[in-house]
Image: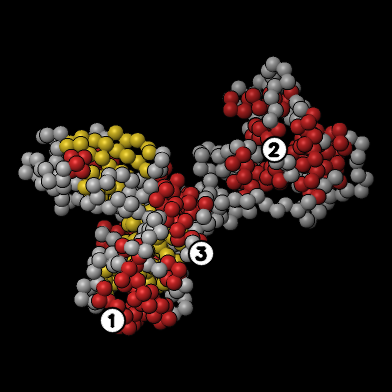
Amino acid sequence: MKKLLGVFITIVLMISLFPHTGVEGAAKKRFNMTYLFAASATDPIKYINMTNESLDQVSPRYFQVLDNGTMDVHMPANSRAFIEEMHKRNIEVVPFLANNWAKGELMFTNSEKITDQIVKTIKDYKLDGINIDVEGLGPIYRSQFTEFIQMLDKKLPNDKILSIAVAPNPWGTNKGWQGFYDYEALAECVDFLFIMTYDERGGGSKNNGPVASYSFIEKSVQYALKHVSPEKIVLGIPFYGRVWNLKDVSNPNDSQDGNSQIILGESISLNKVEELMDAFDVKIEYNKESESVKGTFEVKQGEPGFKLKSWLQPLKPGTYEMWIENESSIKKKLELVHKYNLKGVGSWSLGQEDPALWQDFRLWLDGLEFSDVGINHWALKSIEFVKERKWMLGKNTVTTFKPEDSLTRAEAAAILSRVLGLTYIEPANTPFTDIAGQQWASENIEIVRQHGIMKGTGVTTFEPGKALTREEMAAILDRLLADKYANNIPKKIMFTDQNQISSWAYDSIIRMSGNYVFSGYDDGTFKPKKNINRAEMAALLSRMADKFPE
């Protein structure tokens, strides 16, 4: 115990003697965009309202490259009102230009006209930029695509966004549609590359498995980082899964009951999974290797028909495998944004997700632990740190810290015993009769009593729910430092509110202040009766931890 207190003494003394450089943390405001397609394109406000104010940008499909090489601009009747509403919410509107998969290569013969159309529409409708989402073309068109982007970049006003959706390339190949994108040359022109890190297995694939495994995504990011700086990379997240009929996997030509529809990687929106689980006995398992969710189920003869999409036939009898994402898998994959310090994420597509996903999405994306501790909170890094060390945990729920709540005496007892690693000196024999309802902290209270760190407010009372004041904290620190400063009382330390200091705390405050352990405020006050809050305690602990030897 003396060794532990000795370390603590040294550390606390250094709190005020050395400037605090902060605790490194992962939290940072990250970019979050999503595509508006299908249902969310028809009724975008409805789905945007479900996102818990977590979006920075939306991308509706206003531009379409036709197979003949021309471009169709389709601005819905309510588009101006929608754009204005998004701007009121500080959400950028950056529509995407799409082609029909592996078609539209004739667009490069009309580059001048198409780029002019894009720039004019952006200006006319006060759009925030353009997202180029041309897919499926091969490496033969690589240079033409790059030149198209360079031309568009020169014509766009400087305050407009230019981004590109690119194929994931975990294999580092220059063949197939991956070879269409010159990451390095494109990155010189655009604000970011949206890497479509999904469809590891696409529709029609007989290779059943995850839509976006962790390794697939990470290898795609690692390849991109060889050519693009991290602040220009946006990670793609799928809001859908895929389903396979296992008999179709082994024999796609077989059919039953007149239902010849082959189910090989047919997509299913995440918001439809619950309905499927209600219809069938789906066995769910979390696949740790891929950080994805696998479900298996059987459709029996005579069971009510279930359609993956309204225009498809009902699932025919057979055994099925489904790979999807859930909150755990998406949260895990968002960790890659922090690991590689990427710009942020984008999702395909809004309206396909389970709306419950948005409750804590911003927390996960920004690397925040608590919903009530924002990116700009003065004690953010300290709170992150003490949570990681398990010195201070959430309050009321695992996602709320309650930083402005006063620190209670029970909380202080629990925290100090955790930080110092204290255990019982002797069998528990507490004199306190008022801690029975504080089972979570009763052992900690008895431990700090035995070590002489905290006393009761009376002979038989501890008052565990009472807030801890600054003068009480000074007294606690003074007890920890008693051997060091027992005979060292500075003579001329004065506070303008000195008359408010309790007599029992006076020497402790003078001793702690005079030795730069517990200082007063810039206005000359100490505020002895002011309650210490949880954020302040976290900051104190993180500063102490800075001085711990590794």
Q: As rendered, which of 116 and 371 lies closer to the eye? A: 116
Q: x and y percent of residue 238 in the render?
A: 35, 53
| Label 3 SS | loop
In the image, taking residue 116 as reference, residue 301 lies left or right, namely: left
Rounded to the nearest angstrom, the CA distance separating label 1 from label 2 is: 72 Å
Q: Answer yes or no: do the residues labelled 1 and 3 have beta carbons within 8 Å?
A: no
What's under tag 3, amino acid-wise?
Ser
Q: Residue at x 63, y 37 (%)?
A: 391
Q: Is residue 422 above or below residue 341?
A: above
Tell me the residue that label 1 is attached to: 110
| Label 2 SS | loop
Q: x and y percent of residue 344 in the render?
A: 46, 58
Q: Nearer the viewer, mark 2 or mark 3?
A: 3
In the image, taking residue 163 as reference, residue 383 lies left or right, namely: right
Q: Is residue 98 above or below residue 395?
A: below
| Label 1 SS | helix
Looking at the image, can residue 532 be seen?
no
Q: Which mark is residue 468?
A: 2
What's under tag 2, amino acid-wise?
Leu
In the image, taking residue 464 as reference, residue 512 lies left or right, namely: right
Q: Residue at x 69, y 24 (%)?
A: 423
Q: Residue at x 11, y 34 (%)?
A: 302
Q: As rendered, which of 104 and 405 lies closer to the eye? A: 104
Tell me the residue that label 3 is attached to: 229
**Of callouts 1 and 3, the N-terminal one:** 1
Rounded to the nearest angstrom, the CA distance separating label 1 from label 3 is: 31 Å
Q: Quadrant of residue 322?
A: top left
What's under tag 1, amino acid-wise?
Asn
Q: Which mark is residue 490?
A: none
Rounded to the nearest angstrom, the CA distance separating label 2 from label 3 is: 48 Å
Q: Residue at x 62, y 45 (%)?
A: 385
